[in-house]
Image (cartoon, rainbow, N blue to C red):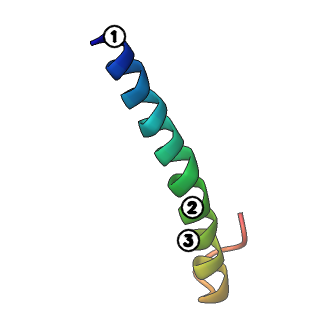
Amino acid sequence: MNINHAKFRFILLKGVLGWGIPTAILFQLIMYFTGEQDFF
């Protein structure tokens, strides 16, 4: 139970870092190129 929970947390954290950061950067680039706001 405890091992599965740790593995789940690792996968969840890996997913957030793996997809969240590139998505945020991509979103910032889209906003920049569409002229909505300054880059970062």
> Mark 2, residues whose alpha carbon is within 10 Å: few (<14), some, or many (≥20)?
few
- The x, y position of residue 13, in whole percent, is 49, 36
Name the residue beneath numbered marker 3.
27
Residue depicted at x 54% and y 64%: 23
Sequence-wise, which precedes: disc 1 or disc 2? 1
Q: Quadrant of residue 26?
A: bottom right
Name the residue beneath numbered marker 2.
24
- The x, y position of residue 6, in whole percent, is 42, 20
For the C terminus, which image quadrant? bottom right
The residues tagged by marks 1 and 2 sit, at their Cα atoms, a distance apart of 32 Å
Q: Is residue 3 left or right of residue 27?
A: left
Q: Nearer the viewer, mark 1 or mark 2?
A: 1
The residues tagged by marks 2 and 3 sit, at their Cα atoms, a distance apart of 5 Å
Can you say whether 4 is above or below 29 in the image? above
Q: Amino acid at mark 2?
A: Ala
Can you say whether 12 is above or below 33 in the image? above
Name the residue beneath numbered marker 1.
2
- The x, y position of residue 17, in whole percent, is 57, 46
Disc number for residue 11:
none
Q: Is there CB contact under 8 Å for labels 2 and 3?
A: yes
Which one is nearer the viewer's eye here, 10 or 33?
10
Q: SS for tag 3?
A: helix
For the N terminus, which image quadrant? top left
Residue depicted at x 42% and y 26%: 7
Can you say whether 11 is above or below 29 in the image? above
